[in-house]
Image: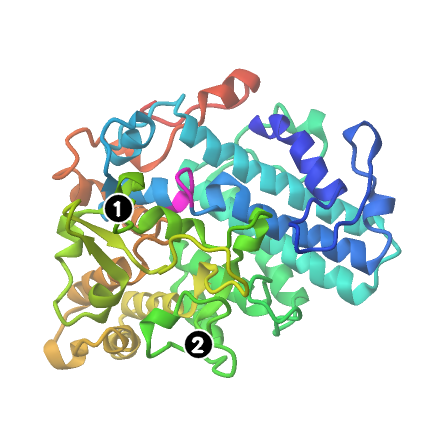
Amino acid sequence: MKINTYILKGFLIIGLLNLCACEEFVEVAPPNNKLVSEEVFNSDATARSAMTGIYNQLFLTEFSSGSRSSITVLSGLSADNIQNINPNVLTRMQFENNDLLADNESNLAIWSSAYSIIYMTNAMLEGLGNSSNISVELSDQLEGETRFIRAFTYFYLVNLYGDLPLILTTNYKENQLASRMSKNDIYLQIVNDLEVAMALLPSEYTTGERTQVNKYAAIALSARVHLFLQDWEKAIDLSAMVIDASSTYELLNNINDVFLANSREAIWQISPIGGGGGLTQTNEGSLFIIHPVFSFLASIKLRPSFATAFEGEDLRFQNWIGYHEGEDAFFAYKYKIWNSSEFPIEEYSMVLRFAEQYLIRAEAYAQTGNLTEAIKDIAMIQQRAGLSPVSETKPNISQEELLDLIMEERRKELFAEWGHRWFDLQRTDNAGGTLSDIKPLWETTDFLYPIPSEERRKNPNLSQNEGY
C-alpha cells in the first residue's frame, strides 16, 4: 500500500514532532527512522506536541488540505456544484467527467495521504499505550482525539472506495499485504472509535481553539455516520446532543462570520498554522476565490446551473457566492481571504459545523415520518438564509417532497465543503439520475473511485472496484 512510501514521513511527524514554526519544537532524533516511544511519550508536554503535529499535518496532507488534491475539490468535481476552469487539466477533468482512471495521480494522493494520517494515529495510540509517563487524564484525552481522527479519516475512505484494508497497527509486514475488509467492517471500526472518543473527550476545548476536537466533535461526526448508516433514531439522538449544547454552539445570524477562526458555529476546524510558513490564509480561500486582478491563477469555479439555483433573496447566494465579470464565472466565497500573512489568523478551514446537525436531524426526522419536527429543523436553516420557512410556503408538503427539499438545502448550505454533495448523491442512490444528464461519460459503477494502480502493484491482495 502507499502508506509504505509515507512511512518515513509518518515516523518523522510522530517521532520528531514536526510542528509549525509557531509551536515549540521538541527535538527527538529516532535512530534508523523508527519511533522512539519512550522519548516521544516521556511527558505530558511531548505527548501533547505529538498530537499537535497530527493536527498540523491535516492542513498539509492532500485529502484534508482543502487544496487541489483534497476531497473538498475532487469529490466536489465529481458532483454537480463545481467544475474546472481549464479543461486541459486532465487529472482533475477525470473527476469532473466521472471518468477516473486507476492511475490518476490525484486519486492516489487521496488514498495515500489518508492512510498516512491513519498510520500516524496508529503510532500515536501505540505510543500512548506503551507509556507510563503521561498523566492518565491527558492520556485518555489524547486517545480520544486520536481515535476521532482515525474514524474521521476512515469515514472518507470508506465512502470514496467502499471495501478497504483496515490498518490498526504500525506493523509494516502486517500492513503491506493487507486485504480489503468489507464496508460494514470499516463502519464498525469507525463507530467503535467514535464511541471511545465520546467517552474519553472533554466537552470543552481545553486549548481554547476549535482546531482541537472535543466530545461534541465526536458526537457530531457520529451523528453523520449514523445518518449514512440509515440509523435514523440514533442520528436524531446524537445530533440533538450537539444542538442542545447552546452554551457552546449557535447558528450565526451573520453568515459571513461562520468561517472565521473559532466561530460559534464551528465544531471542528483546521488552522493554516499547520503550513508552518508565513502565509495564514486557508487553502480553500486561495483556491476558490477568483481574484479580481490575478484571475489567471484560478482553477475552480461554480457550475452556473448551481449558482443560479438559489433564490435571489437567499443570503447564501448574496454572501457565499462571488462573481468575476472578466471570467464570467461564479465562485465559492465562503472564505473571504485569498492571501494573508497576518496574525492573529482570521479564518480556519471548517470541517464540522453546527448547521449540518440541523440538516442531519431534519433528514432523520423526515425518514421516520416525523414531518413536524423535520420542518422545524429545516426552517432553522432556511430562516438563517433569509428565506420563508417551508411551513409557510408549502404547509402540506409530503414526506418525499420534504426529503427532496432537505437534500436541496444540504446542497446550498454545504457546497464547496468536504464533498458533501457527492456523498449525498451517492448514499441516496441519486448519483446516476442527477449526473447522467450533465455528464455523458457517467456509468453506474462511478459512484466509487478506483483503488489506485500503484497500490495494487505493491499489494497483490488488493482487489479493484467494479468498472475499473
Tell me the chief SS of the magenta region: loop
Q: Quadrant of the N terminus?
A: top right
Q: Is residue 395 visible?
A: no
Question: What span is colored magenta in the figure?
Answer: 67-72
Q: Viewed as shown, does residue 124 lie left or right of 246? A: right
Q: Residue 153: horizontal and vertical position, in percent?
A: 52, 46
Give the number of the disc on residue 311: none
Q: Nearer the viewer, residue 41 or 298?
A: 298
Q: Is residue 250 visible?
A: yes
Q: Residue 426: horizontal and vertical position, in percent?
A: 30, 45
Q: Tag 2 or tag 1, which sits nearer the N-term?
A: 2
Give the image quarter of residue 372: bottom left
Q: What amino acid type is highlighted by mark number 2?
A: Ile
Question: Which element carries disc 2, helix, strand or loop?
Answer: helix
Q: Viewed as shown, does residue 205 lie left or right of 235? A: right
Residue positioned 37% across, 77% down in the render: 252
Q: Residue 79: horizontal and vertical position, in percent?
A: 26, 44
Front label number (1 vs 2): 2
Label 1 crowd bin: few (<14), some (14–19), many (20+), radius 10 Å: few
Does the magenta portion include 70? yes
Measure how far apart labels 1 and 2 are at the Cα level. 28 Å
Residue positioned 59% across, 55% down in the render: 148
Q: Viewed as shown, does residue 282 lie left or right of 293? A: right
Q: Nearer the viewer, residue 287 or 189?
A: 287
Instruction: Kindly check if marks 1 and 2 are in contact, taking CB atoms under 8 A apart as contact.
Output: no
Q: What amino acid type is highlighted by mark number 1?
A: Asp
Give the image quarter of residue 9: top right
Residue positioned 46% across, 45% down in the render: 156
Residue positioned 72% across, 43% down in the render: 14
The residue singled out by tag 1 in the image is 429
Does the magenta portion include 111? no
The residue singled out by tag 2 in the image is 243
